Image (spheres, rainbow, N blue to C red):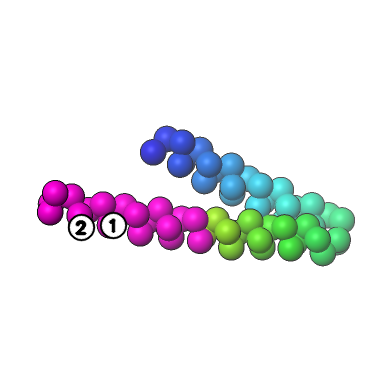
Amino acid sequence: MLILRALGLLLLVAIAVCAGLGLLSRQPHFFRWAWNLFRYGVVIALVFVALFALERLIAPII
């Protein structure tokens, strides 16, 4: 769980850096990077939440 939190924090820092660079340089590819990182981060977080929920559902059966 500590690794997931560290990766989540790293993702937030990467998004903030990309957005900050986009604001400073006004180059749109930084905003695209930030948006893509955000989207993929949300998808990966939803997959982990689904796996945790599935584990909770299957654990009493086994």
Compared across the picture, whether 15 is left or right of 32 comes to: left
Helix, strand or loop at label 2? It is: helix
Identify the residue shown where x is 59% and y is 49%.
12
In front: 34, or 57?
57
For label 2, the residue is 57
Quadrant for residue 46, please give it: bottom left
Q: Position of residue 52 (x, y in %)?
A: 31, 52
In space, the residues marked 1 and 2 are separated at their CA atoms by 6 Å
* Magenta stretch: helix, strand or loop mostly: helix
Q: Position of residue 11 (x, y in %)?
A: 59, 47
Quadrant for residue 27, please give it: bottom right
Identify the residue shown where x is 43% and y is 58%.
47
For label 1, the residue is 53
Q: Position of residue 37 (x, y in %)?
A: 63, 56
Q: Is residue 52 magenta?
A: yes
In front: 47, or 7?
47
Instruction: Tell me the quarter of the image containing the N terminus.
Output: top left
Helix, strand or loop at label 1? It is: helix
In front: 18, or 57?
57
Magenta segment range? 43-62
Compared across the picture, whether 38 is left or right of 58 comes to: right
Q: Position of residue 25 (x, y in %)?
A: 87, 56
Q: Which mark is residue 16?
A: none
In front: 14, or 62?
62
Circle 1: residue type: Ala
Q: Assess disc 1: are there few (<14), some (14-19) or many (≥20) residues with their C-alpha within 10 Å of its C-alpha.
A: few
Circle 2: residue type: Leu
Above or below: residue 27 compared with residue 10: below
Q: Is residue 15 magenta?
A: no
Identify the residue shown where x is 28% and y is 57%.
53
Determine whether label 1 and label 2 are within 8 Å by CB. Answer: yes
